[in-house]
Amino acid sequence: MSIKISAELSHICPLEDVKEHAESLEQLGYYRIWVPDTVASPWEAWLAASLIVHHTNRVHIGVGVMNPHTRHPFVTAQMAATLQHLSGGRLALSIGKGIGRFLEKAGINQHESAVEEFITVLRQLIAGERTSLDGNAFHLDGLRIRVRPPSEPVPIYMAAIGMDSWRSALQVADGVETMWHDQCAETRRLAIPENSFPSAVLLPFSISRKNFFPRQVGSVAELQDRVSLLDESGFDEAVVAYGDMADLETAAKIIRNH
């Protein structure tokens, strides 16, 4: 099995426990810790990611899924370049449309092209380029970050479910992050016939909390079956979304069976 096993930091993990979770995830052998950018968590995503960087040495770190409406690309580029330096090149980002209902309640106008525009200018900004764009969602006039551009590029994933968003990701992103669903392997096969595009799948898993996630997996055997299917289908990374420490320790059995 060649697929990497990562984890999404539990969105209910208390701020004071982030250090313990990060150290445990690294010790258990997870490839990457994705920090969800969600208003439902008791911490801010970039702060939590910084804590993880400070308290780990090897594990990779992802931030996302971020949305382009509450994170401006210039500010995001400054933060990403800074954290890429501090982490020694361990950072990745994931960008998606965001939760429509929350954005509506926040009074934010959404643009169909926002994700694509965001990823395009974000990559240029992180690289230290003076960037301009007169788009539908963003208007930048010769902006350049003050942080020294990192020598290691920051991979930018795009959140995608349906075929249209997969095809869009192929045009502008460095990879795809998707949620588990029954057709995800078939969608990947149709979108990427050559099998050469980085792709990660979020797998909700909890043995200690029933109905904690929609469509969650409740046993190691079922989780192993799904990871094996994803591996056979060409996915590069399985991301275990867990509820608490007991879940991440149990899911780590898959890593030991690699």
Image (cartoon, helix red, strand yellow):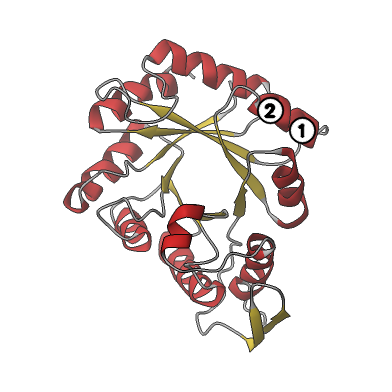
Indicate left or right for 151 with 132 as reference: left
Q: State the image coordinates of residue 139 (x, y, percent, origin top left).
A: 65, 81
Q: Residue furthest bottom?
A: 142
Kindly identify the residue that appears in the image at 36 percent across and 25 percent down. Answer: 252
Q: What amino acid is at disc 2?
A: Gly
Q: Is residue 157 above or below residue 192?
A: below
Q: Quadrant of the N terminus?
A: top right
Q: Nearer the viewer, residue 35 or 19?
A: 35
Q: Is residue 167 above or below residue 190?
A: below
- The image quadrant of residue 155 is bottom right
Q: State the image coordinates of residue 232 (x, y, percent, origin top left).
A: 66, 19
Q: Residue furthest left?
A: 16
Circles 1 and 2 in contact, beta carbons < 8 Å:
yes
Q: What amino acid is at disc 1?
A: Asn
What numbered label is drawn on residue 195?
Answer: 1
Q: Which residue is mark 2?
A: 234
- SS at circle 1: loop
Q: State the image coordinates of residue 33 (x, y, percent, origin top left).
A: 41, 44
Kindly identify the residue that appears in the image at 78 percent across and 36 percent down. Answer: 191
Q: Earlier in the sequence, mark 1 or mark 2?
A: 1
Indicate left or right for 232 with 240 as reference: right
Task: Determine if residue 249 is in view.
Answer: yes
